[in-house]
Amino acid sequence: MVTFEHVSFSYNEEGKEAQIIDDLNFRIKKGSFTALIGPSGCGKSTILSLICGFYKPKKGSIFLDSDLQGTGKIGYMLQNDHLLEWRTIFKNILLGLEIQKKKTKETLQYAHSLLSKYGLREYENAKPSALSGGMRQRAALIRTLVLQPSLLLLDEPFSALDYQTRLHVSSDIYHIIKEEEKTAILVTHDIAEAVALADTIIVLTKSPCTVKEIIPIKFEQNGITREAVRSTPLFQYYFDLVWEALQNEKE
Amino acid sequence: MKKNRNITFLRIFVFASFLLLWQVAADKQWIDSFYFSSPLLLYQQFIHDMTDMSLFRHCFFTLSEFFISFILIIGGSIFLAALFWFFQTLGKVMEPFLIILNSLPKSALAPLIIVWLGTGIKPIILCGISVGIFGSVLHFYQSFCNTDPERIKLIRTLGGNKVHIFTKVVFPGNIPLILSMSKVNIGLALVGVIIGEFLAGRQGIGYLIIYSSQTFKMTIMIMSICILCLLSALLYLVVNQVERFILNKKY
């Protein structure tokens, strides 16, 4: 679905060329949940911006499947929910539809159905301040999903939440993404979160970043459901594997 | 609640005591009522000028000039600040000029405006505008530029362009500032209009003040100042109510 081939990226900082990404190669399969993990400042979010087309690679190529061409095909979820406080939850959810001029009877119905499905229907006329952190994050995800993107980019979407809420919300969002059959790329610092959610973990080196290791995560193949992964020895095994790969990649 | 009532009572008491003391001082000739007038003389003058409608006419002119100036300050400031935000190079070029013009005592501009535009309503309105517009443009422009970059990124992730960023995030996010600047501009526009009337008016409260000072009609002068106080308080209350209404509805 997304292929990076020898991608390098740098930008000009006060007259100096700062190399952020160097010869990055990886492939994201359709329907997969991939986590990008690496030291902070290594360029994880830049990779998402490259996929989105906000930046162009200096060298190499990024190949996107045909179903990712055109506006609204790639959904992006930011670190904070950024729900606009002057809009109701429903109007916040319609933001992307308004921008892309896709506000039709069908899309409005779809927005309503998503709100009902994910327990926010009764809050549709509420202001964002009336919602808990987890509900706000769910609303932000619905705002992205309502555009029916084929690929979801999650840029540390749980980092602003407290630990307990984070566990609940990450699990909720994992299930929503799987239920909607979306491909997702998650950027995170949190090894446990990456292991608990992803099918594949791409460990990145410190800046200029490149792929250090690609670790496939196989819970389902071992008969373990995602709800139960955290208490299994396999979870600890994958955790240690990622931790080991990150050992020499301090900031 | 009871404390608030006591404070209101004390305010009325202080004001009433001041009026009483003023009247007694005038009656006992502790002060010369030719220079200082008295509440009773003010009341008689007020009734006289209301009966012959002259006071209405002066108030109508001042208020008309004020409203035109006020609307042009707010509308013009938003337009210019938006223009500078859209064309940031232009904004950066203009910023120091705005800072200089804002720090200039605006009353210094009034004689120049009168020479350029002569007498009548135009120079008065321009005086009114000149007092408030530079500060407002500067405030709005700086606040537009300080919009959270993550919110801008959100609009871009939803497929939005610069117009969407302005209409969906920058402008609505600055409505509280626009409302609070409106309150500040009530006073400023009124100051500008009165300065304009001092120099170029043939009608209006400013003209009444300058006319009465030249003819030593101190009662008319003090009454005009009191009416000006009441008008500015009234206008402030109106804008305050509008602000509360919008903020309650939208935020």
Image (tube, coloured by chain):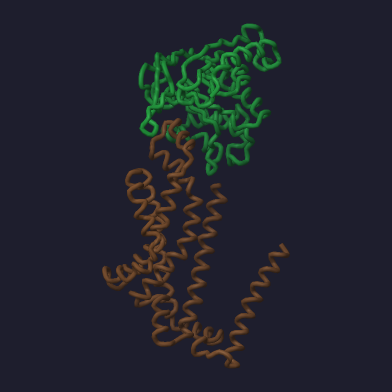
**Colour green belongs to chain:** A
Nearer-the-camera pick, A39 or B111: A39
Q: Quadrant of the N terminus of chain B?
A: bottom right
Residue at coordinates 51% horizontally, 51% vertically from top-left?
A: B176
Residue A175 visible in the shown view: no
Nearer-the-camera pick, B63 or A106: B63
User: Which color is chain B depicted in?
Assistant: brown
Nearer-the-camera pick, B46 or B24: B24
Q: Picture quarter containing residue B130?
A: bottom left
| Rendered view: B27 above or below B231 | below
Q: Residue furthest top?
A: A222
Residue A244 screen position, x and y as percent: 60, 14
Q: Picture quarter containing residue B156?
A: top left
Residue at coordinates 44% horizontally, 83% vertically from top-left?
A: B52
Q: Residue furthest bottom?
A: B28
Residue A127 screen position, x and y as percent: 58, 41
Residue A218 screen position, x and y as percent: 60, 9
Q: Is residue B209 left or right of residue B240?
A: left
Residue at coordinates 56% horizontally, 86% vertically from top-left?
A: B40
Residue A43 screen position, x and y as percent: 47, 24
